[in-house]
């Protein structure tokens, strides 16, 4: 009789805290009258704060693993989990007024959001194929429901459907790749996998490359890299803005973690293979993302294409294949999520009379009516374009540095040329806000809730602050890969 | 004792902090915003004076050095310091900003606080660019100053301002991103972003040529050199007067400064190899753009083209040295380099003054077309005196600063080749032709129409800033020694550096 080994539960404490609190929220919310819905938000934010505190409390000096090696808590996981908690707090607070304006101010938004967050946390710590997949599905299923949350909206239902079908296909491809790897190596554990792959790659490399292709395709789907990006613009545009805000920020960090766990931790020995694939994906993403974004009139859709181009940049850092490159990609991902939170955050609190603001022309003359919010959005736009002294510049600099370091100067030149193309449509947003006059007979109104104003300002100014003093965050990113 | 103070930090951040204060003073109190802006610009100017008085003219080493580690991961430092090349340009920047604040006093009525704040913040960034000795710090300032200028042209500009400002931003940005890749490449070789370390980096000829071309794109756009000059006339025409002045007086100098700080010392062999390219581009600017200026109908466009022609002299002076050194004539080479530098400073005064003159007329007539004017001297005699004086300086009249730089460069060019000097000297004819012909049509003659008849002469404020500039132009023209003296050791050292092969 084999002895049952009691797993060390401590590394998973944050996840457990989050799960318990989310269940509590689910129950409490049932008994809350509509006018007390604010309590659900409070509870959700409290959940995230407690989780973040738990992460800090159990943060190991080095790295601990549990559950037979399928769950790890290392420096990478700690930093990314804290970033996700922080960003989710921002997302929840920014969304409040939007939800109540659109009569979808329900506790389920927070419950689903928290479950999605839990899925992301699991993805970050997962160190076996199975757990990665479980985390990913928890995230995806929650997101499908969140997108269709406003069931009266046709566009939202359509994009939920699209996301579901394509997302399921991507999961299927990923799963197929996993199953081939399982067939070759006989293990689902990432550590064992990398050992077996090291042996097998000299004997029989072809099936490994075959399986790797499916893993990379599945990953690209989830990250939204060209040519697997088709779902992204439709989903961004169709979802309620509060959900776009959620999808556009934290899941990028989880996707990055998944890429690191699979490609670097598990299949690091196949780096020569996946680097080649990522080069194609990165160049295509930067080209298609930046060029098509120019033609967009819808702000959310434009940001979707801009996300695609930023994913290209993140892939650049990954494909360098050095600790330096991974650290810069991580820095890029975290700061991009923060920047996107500002962009969607400003959009979400803007309201034209009657309709939701989502076209670029809706931003006309924002500097006249609300100079402060115009400045906040301008900082985010400059940061996305990579203009110093915002953090976007430093993120691009560190990625470019790691690419040049591995003698891919041509790739760096391509990347900067595409970012010049990208600059054009970010500047257009500035132009619309600062140089155009407000649309006639349509006043922009902004819900001036104090907590939103403070958080949004802090969020946007942090882009400047991190741009001037990136050292602290960067050192955490470097630590994660040392 | 001054050397102990973090002087450069003060000079960079005082205007930026002032700008933020002005910004938060809001639009409700425009006169307050003007006063705070003036106060901070004057304080900054006074703070830059010790940089000159305490400057040690016996050494080529960096002075007022501040060096702190900033971003450890990439060994990026907060590394400031000035030498004889950057110090005059910093003074020019702080001086010009004061003039711009005074000149915009009543003219700008829309969003005054944002306008003034943009100029103050831009001043800090520009001084930072000249004072940086770390390549990334330089790059950050170099790019960051585009943001306020973009907003200045876009918000307070003319009818076609959006086209012009987008073109301005995209042109300059595309130039500088390639430079960024070159900087990163060199960082990977040296492990540091300090510009002085790059100066000692050994590079093969291919590497040098590629790096040189990356720098060339960045700085040629900024100068601007033919054929990447097309953004400048657009930007100048649409920009408000203050924007044009800063653009012409300071921003164009970034390109010339970049050649001296980066291209020549880092890639001397490539510079020697490709000097024909720069000399051709410079001479084209001098001759061809001179002819283009001749046919302009718009006064601002005319001055913009004349700027391009004059900046052609600067780049000619910098790159002719390789031809002069072929005859081992160190004195001639130094003359060429110093001539380029003097021309930069002098062009800062003269072009700024010319744009201000056009601004003075535009404020009254709301037209920049030469055809709308005629006989202004009859109604604005004081103004006409200034305008004619600055036009003479622009044409290179001896006794004004415009003469000194051009003369030095032409003299030096003779030592390289007669024909280069000959083509360069055509500017004396062309410059006189387009400037004086414009003056003739605008200032002299009969009163052209009722609008001109109704013009009022300049007020005290306008008299103040025009006379300050006139004094500067005269002093530099009659007695350029103080300027040449401070840059001499630096230029000598630079020449040493660029004649030593790095292969």
Image (cartoon, coloured by chain):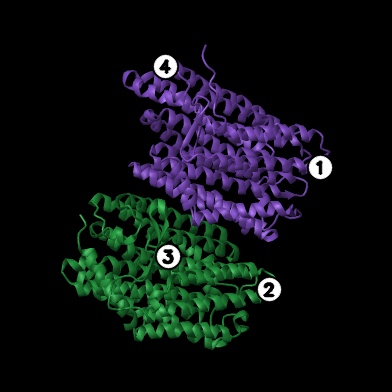
Chain colours: A purple, B green
Q: CA distance from mark 3 to mark 1?
A: 55 Å
Classify mark 4: residues with Cα within 10 Å, few (<14), some (14-19) or many (20+). Answer: some
* Residue A307 coordinates in the image, percent (x, y): 55, 41
- Secondary structure beneath dot 1 equals helix
- Taking depth in this image into account, of B45 and A27 the one nearest to the observer is A27
Q: Which residue is mark 1?
A: A36
* Residue B308 coordinates in the image, percent (x, y): 40, 67
Q: Which residue is mark 3?
A: B129
Residues at marks 4 and 3 on the same chain: no
Q: Which residue is mark 2?
A: B29
Q: Residue at x 50, y 19 (%)?
A: A176
* Residue B374 coordinates in the image, percent (x, y): 53, 80
Query: Does residue A465 appear left or right of residue B55 in this picture?
Result: right
Q: Are marks 3 and 1 in contact (CB under 8 Å)?
A: no
Q: CA distance from mark 3 to mark 2?
A: 32 Å
* Residue B219 coordinates in the image, percent (x, y): 38, 60
**Disc on the earlier residue, 1 or 4:** 1
Say which of marks 2 and 4 sits in front: 4
Classify mark 2: residues with Cα within 10 Å, few (<14), some (14-19) or many (20+). Answer: few
State whether residue B243 is above or below residue A459: below
Say which of marks 1 and 4 sits in front: 1
């Amino acid at each position: 009789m084999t002895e049952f080994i009691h797993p060390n539960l401590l590394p998973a404490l944050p996840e457990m805290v989050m799960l318990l609190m989310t269940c509590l929220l689910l129950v409490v919310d049932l008994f809350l009258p509509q006018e007390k819905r604010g309590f659900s938000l409070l509870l959700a934010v409290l959940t995230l704060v407690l989780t973040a505190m738990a992460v800090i409390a159990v943060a190991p000096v080095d790295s601990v693993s549990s559950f037979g090696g399928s769950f790890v808590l290392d420096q990478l996981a700690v930093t990314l989990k804290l970033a996700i908690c922080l960003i989710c707090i921002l997302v929840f607070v920014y969304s409040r007024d939007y939800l109540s304006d659109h009569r979808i101010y329900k506790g389920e938004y927070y419950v689903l959001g928290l479950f999605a967050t839990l899925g992301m946390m699991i993805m970050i710590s997962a160190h076996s194929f199975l757990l990665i997949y479980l985390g990913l599905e928890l995230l995806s299923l929650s997101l499908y429901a969140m997108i269709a949350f406003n069931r009266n909206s046709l566009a939202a239902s359509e994009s939920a459907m699209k996301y579901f079908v394509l997302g399921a296909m991507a999961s299927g491809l990923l799963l197929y790749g996993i199953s081939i790897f399982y067939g070759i190596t006989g293990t689902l554990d990432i550590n064992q996998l990398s050992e077996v792959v090291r042996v097998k790659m000299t004997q029989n490399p072809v099936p490994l490359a075959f399986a790797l292709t499916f893993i990379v395709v599945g990953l690209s789907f989830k990250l939204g890299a060209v040519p697997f990006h088709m779902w992204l613009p439709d989903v961004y545009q169709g979802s309620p803005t509060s959900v776009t805000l959620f999808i556009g920020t934290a899941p990028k960090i989880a996707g990055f973690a998944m890429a690191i766990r699979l490609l670097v931790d598990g299949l690091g020995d196949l780096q020569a293979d996946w680097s080649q694939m990522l080069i194609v994906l990165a160049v295509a993403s930067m080209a298609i993302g930046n060029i098509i974004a120019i033609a967009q009139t819808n702000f959310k859709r434009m940001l979707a294409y801009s996300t695609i181009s930023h994913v290209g940049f993140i892939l650049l850092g990954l494909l360098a294949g050095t600790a330096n490159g991974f650290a810069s990609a991580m820095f890029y991902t975290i700061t991009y999520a923060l920047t996107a939170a500002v962009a969607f955050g400003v959009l979400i609190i803007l309201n034209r009379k009657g309709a939701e603001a989502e076209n670029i022309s809706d931003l006309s003359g924002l500097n006249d009516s609300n100079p402060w919010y115009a400045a906040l959005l301008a900082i985010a736009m400059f940061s996305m374009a990579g203009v110093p002294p915002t953090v976007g510049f430093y993120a691009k600099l560190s990625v470019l540095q790691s690419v040049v370091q591995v003698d891919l100067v041509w790739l760096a030149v391509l990347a900067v040329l595409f970012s010049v193309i990208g600059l054009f449509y970010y500047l257009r947003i500035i132009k619309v806000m600062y140089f155009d006059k407000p649309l006639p007979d349509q006043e922009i109104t902004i819900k001036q809730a104090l907590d939103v104003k403070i958080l949004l300002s802090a969020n946007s100014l942090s882009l400047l602050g991190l741009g001037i003093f990136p050292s602290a965050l960067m050192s955490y990113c470097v630590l994660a890969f040392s | 004792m001054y050397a102990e103070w973090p002087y450069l930090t003060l000079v960079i951040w005082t205007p930026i902090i002032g700008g933020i204060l002005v910004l938060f003073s809001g639009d409700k109190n425009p006169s307050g915003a003007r006063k705070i802006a003036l106060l901070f610009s004057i304080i900054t100017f006074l703070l830059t004076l010790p940089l000159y008085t305490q400057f040690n003219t016996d050494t080529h080493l960096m002075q007022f050095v501040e060096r702190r580690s900033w971003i450890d991961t990439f060994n990026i430092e907060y590394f400031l310091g000035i030498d004889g090349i950057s110090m005059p340009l910093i003074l020019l920047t702080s001086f010009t900003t004061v003039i711009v604040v005074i000149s915009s006093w009543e003219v700008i009525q829309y969003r005054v606080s944002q306008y003034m704040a943009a100029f103050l913040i831009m001043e800090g960034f520009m001084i930072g660019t000249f004072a940086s000795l770390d390549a990334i710090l330089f790059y950050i300032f170099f790019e960051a100053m585009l943001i306020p200028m973009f907003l200045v042209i876009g918000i307070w500009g003319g009818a076609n301002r959006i086209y012009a400002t987008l073109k301005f931003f995209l042109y300059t940005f595309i130039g500088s991103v390639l430079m960024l890749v070159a900087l990163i490449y060199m960082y990977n070789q040296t492990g540091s972003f300090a510009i002085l370390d790059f100066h000692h980096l050994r590079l093969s000829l291919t590497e040098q040529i590629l790096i040189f071309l990356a720098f060339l794109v960045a700085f040629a756009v900024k100068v601007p050199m033919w054929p990447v000059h097309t953004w400048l006339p657009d930007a100048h025409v649409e920009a408000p007067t203050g924007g044009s002045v800063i653009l012409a007086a300071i921003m164009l100098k970034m390109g010339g400064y970049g050649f001296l700080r980066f291209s020549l010392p880092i890639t001397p062999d490539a510079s020697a190899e490709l000097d024909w390219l720069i000399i051709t581009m410079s001479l084209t600017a001098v001759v061809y753009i001179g002819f283009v200026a001749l046919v302009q109908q718009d006064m601002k466009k005319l001055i913009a083209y004349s700027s391009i022609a004059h900046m052609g002299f600067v780049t000619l002076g910098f790159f002719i040295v390789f031809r002069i050194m072929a005859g081992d004539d160190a004195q001639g080479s130094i003359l060429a380099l110093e001539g380029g530098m003097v021309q930069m400073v002098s062009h800062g005064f003269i072009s700024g003054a010319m744009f201000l003159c056009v601004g003075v007329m535009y404020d009254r007539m709301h037209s920049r077309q030469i055809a709308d004017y005629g006989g202004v001297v009859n109604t604005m005699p004081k103004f006409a005196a200034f305008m004619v004086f600055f036009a003479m300086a622009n044409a290179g009249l001896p006794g004004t600063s415009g003469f000194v730089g051009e003369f030095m460069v032409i003299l030096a060019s003779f030592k390289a080749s007669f024909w280069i000097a000959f083509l360069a000297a055509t500017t004396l004819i062309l410059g006189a032709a387009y400037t004086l012909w414009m003056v003739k049509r605008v200032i002299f003659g009969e009163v052209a129409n009722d609008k001109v008849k109704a013009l009022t002469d300049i007020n005290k404020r306008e008299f103040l800033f025009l006379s300050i500039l006139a004094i500067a132009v005269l002093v530099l023209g009659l007695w350029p020694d103080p300027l040449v003296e401070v840059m001499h050791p630096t230029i000598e050292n630079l020449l040493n550096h660029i004649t030593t092969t790095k292969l």
